[in-house]
Image: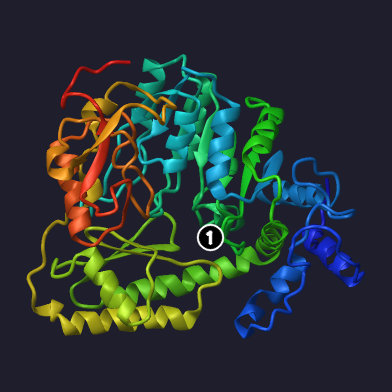
Amino acid sequence: MNLNQHRAPILEALLHHQEKQTASFHVPGHKNDNQRGHQEDSWFTNVMKLDMTELTGLDDLHEPSGCIAQAQQLAASAFGASHTWFLVGGSTVGNLSVICAWSRPGDIWIVDRHAHKSVMNALKLVEARVAFLPARFHPQTGIPVQLDVMDIEHMLKRYPQARGVLITSPTYYGYQSDLKAIADRVHHYGMPLIVDEAHGAHFSFHPSLPQSAMQAGADVAIQSTHKMLGAMTMSAMLHLQGNRIDPALIRQALGMLQSSSPSYPLMASLDVARRDAALHGYDLLQVGMQQLQSLSEQIEGIEGIGILRADDPFKMYVYDKTRSLNGHQLREQLELRGCMMELADETGVLAVHSLYTKQGHLGRLRDSLQAISEKYRLGKQELKPSVWNTYSTPLCMEESAGLIHFQNNLHAPSQLVDLEMAEGYRAAEMVIPYPPGVPLWVQGERITRASLEALVRWVSHGGHVQGLDAAGSRIRVLAETPSGSDEG
């Protein structure tokens, strides 16, 4: 099918409707206008004009046959998929929908332990049994890196009855696993490969970038189009190819889990992001990679500052090689100079670039790091041979050695205990350093001394955590004796 990637069907339909100047006797309540007399409300004026509902000519996300269907077909063509669905609940709703569509209670899933919390929640909803793949870490910084194909092979042999394999690639930090080799091995065992590709939506548009999940042969890829391309926050895409998973099942799951009142501005932003990436992605990515290569060389020349470039050149991890500043302190110093980082961890900060990063902002980051180096006299400090990071702590490896039965039981007896008393208990809910949103413990995992110490360090350094009480000093655990028997 020869599709015209210059088109943006959803945006075109919205603009066409707006031109008709119809009288609104339908939702939304703002009536596509903004005459409230508050000057600050003017920021919403243009968005409200396009914030429509399922009117004649504007199609229906849950049963598309017009402009939305056309936009999704264009996206499937651009990203190399057989089917593409627009998501207005981020990659989160994509992860939820695929697992709910393709799982039955008690099914075994082979899952990357550094999966996002939405994956863990989906596994909980379907009450899956989960075999976690062992995590691999960068030897210098401890951040999670590529999965080992042999680890996946081992799990496939151990659990040949598994329903499927779900991995995260690229990682939040930009490390890409060998998806072609992984897909080949997973398919050899007759299973589908699902890739949480939230941070890899741009990979399809330049040959110097890692191979995308669709290009590598994965069955499903879920992408946060808002993260690395130009869509609005919460807008994402779900891509499917092959015949291992029935698209009708995904359609049904999305119908249950996506809003029945999807945002037209979000869908239009997906349409425009696809159009711009398909038409101009190569050139923009080429310029961006050249600028980032130059920036990396400049930062490497700053005394005391270390930089890691992952498989994705648009992810840049920066840290203090002298350990005078931990990652949270480095972030604070950068923010004082107007540079807002994607995340900070115990060791360093992550800078995320995209097609649209301004060159002037790259210079500000370089100058800020230079100023920090001079302020703390990093060139005069002793360089540390190695750095250790919260995520280098083995995450409940004793528990992860076997199957964990995820149970959808919000009402299991539980209690709050002080952090210093939590060792040996099982977590009653996920505890999540955020970002990146990877649970330190999932429900039912045993709280070990090593992982507890990692959490305490994270909190003491100023890291944000989801899953603690309001004071950040207590955790909810299952009501049982610490280090109790492993039931279920």
The residue depicted at 73 percent of the width and 58 percent of the height is 264
Q: Position of residue 363 (x, y in %)?
A: 40, 82
- Please give left or right for residue 41 compared with residue 213 in the image: right
> Dot 1 corresponds to which residue?
228
**Quarter location, residue 383:** bottom left
The quadrant of the picture occupied by the N terminus is top right
Q: Nearer the viewer, residue 141 or 49?
A: 49
The quadrant of the picture occupied by the C terminus is top left
**Does the image show residue 29?**
yes
Q: Position of residue 145 (x, y in %)?
A: 33, 46
Q: Position of residue 156 (x, y in %)?
A: 41, 21
- Please give left or right for residue 367 compared with residue 70 in the image: left
**Quarter location, residue 316:** bottom left
**Does the image show residue 217?**
no
418 in relation to 295, above or below? above
The residue depicted at 70 percent of the width and 79 percent of the height is 36
- Please give left or right for residue 125 compared with residue 151 in the image: right
Q: Nearer the viewer, residue 120 or 260?
A: 260
- Please give left or right for residue 50 compared with residue 194 in the image: right
Q: Position of residue 204 (x, y in %)?
A: 60, 52
Q: Nearer the viewer, residue 294 or 463?
A: 463
Q: Amino acid at mark 1?
A: Met
Q: Secondary structure at mark 1?
A: helix
417 in relation to 247, above or below? below
The residue depicted at 24 percent of the width and 54 percent of the height is 471
